[in-house]
Amino acid sequence: MQNRYNKTKVFIAACIGMSFFGISMIVLGAILPILSDKFGLNTAQTTSLVAFLPIGMLIGSVIFGPIVDQRGYKGLLIISSFLILTGLEGVVFLESVHLVKLSIFLIGFGGGILNGETNALVSIIYEDSNRNSMLSFLGAFYGLGALGIPVLLSTLLKNYTLQQIFTGIGFVMFILIIYCAVTKYPEATQKQGFPISAGFRLLKSRDLLLLSLILFFQSGIEGVVNNWTVFYLTDFGFLEHSKALITITAMTASLTAARLILVSLLKKFSQKGILITSILIAIAGVSLMIQPEYITSLIGMMLVGFGIASTFPIILGIIGAKYPTMSGTAFSIALVFALLGNNIMNSVTGIWLDKSGAYVYPLILAICFLTILLIFGLVKKSNQAPVES
């Protein structure tokens, strides 16, 4: 009997998971000063605390693909959502710094799973004509989750304790997880058993490696923008801290709005044209970040946010179309590249900025954008057949 599921209900569950991923990416930065004060951590200790998030995320990104291809989506989506919920409450309520490290690892681990799984799930339930636009719609919920935590904290911390706020957040998340638990999902694409040989063939697929490299540089861009923009603007004397924070918030809001707009645009225009146009917009934004003032940096970061919005949904849509029966594993490979790019480009930027000065920040972003355009051109020329089981 054919597995019957409601696309809209499944998509809502995926959006819930993606919003949880957005929370997992931003929550630590939002409460890190509070944790540092609570445990009396110095800079080195605080840095070691943060390191558990990307470690968990990398492991989650590695394992989710083969699991969902063979076992399906429901169980892993529920488990990973609970891991994030448990980690969030642990970070706030636990009194042991070692248990807080474990909680941060759980947040990253669950987030890594949800990022890949929700994208793979949406890629499966929608046909080629709608896949990219719905992936873009899904991506907007990352922005909603990421923006939600700072907004809640800035609004509620005046009248409520951190524990009270996260108790309320935890309750809402629990209700949303229940919705995910009662929803019916598509069946696994490899129920007969995961074909290990086909999985290894994916690693040799030229197109998948090129597409993964695009996400390497795209995620590197996002890491540099999220982690180094405020430093660049403040430490080199361009803006005061409060105004620098506004520019990065404007970038996230612009990215979220752009992904909502792309839901319609991706149905009307070619993905190639949209991606190239978006990157050119982002490069224009980067040019405004050279010797910026407040207005030019604000406009520049909004253009960057708008410009980077299309890359992930378009590239993941292409991967989903090329590898439909092993989309989970293909997404897993691509997102591991993305996480590596985020971590590597973060480190390179920090070292290079320290040695060479302010010009490094816009230069690195421009190089990454141009590299994406070059690699995307190579993918479009490829005639390699999709890898199937």
Image (cartoon, rainbow, N blue to C red):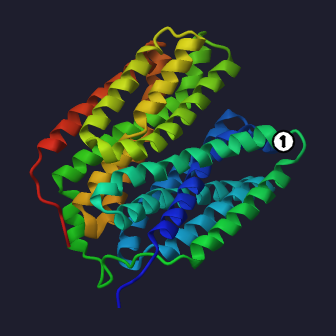
Left or right of residue 355: residue 169: right
SS for callout 1: loop
Rendering quarter of residue 42 = top right
The image shows residue 352 at horizontal and vertical percentages of: 43, 21
380 or 366, nearer to the observer: 380
**As drawn, which residue projects farthest toward the bottom?**
1
Query: Could one spot residue 203 in this view of the protein?
Result: yes
Left or right of residue 89: residue 319: left
**As drawn, which residue projects farthest toward the right?**
159
**As drawn, which residue projects farthest toward the left?**
383
Left or right of residue 10: residue 42: right
The image shows residue 245 at horizontal and vertical percentages of: 65, 26
Query: Where does label 1 land, which residue?
Result: 157
The image shows residue 62 at horizontal and vertical percentages of: 40, 60
* Residue at 68% from the left image edge and 33% from the top image edge: 43
Image quarter in which the N terminus is found: bottom left
Query: Could one spot residue 37 in this view of the protein?
Result: no
**Relative to residue 181, is residue 285 depicted above or below?**
above
Q: Amino acid at mark 1?
A: Leu
Rendering quarter of residue 3 = bottom left
* Residue at 57% from the left image edge and 9% from the top image edge: 293
* Residue at 26% from the left image edge and 47% from the top image edge: 211
Image quarter in which the C terminus is found: bottom left
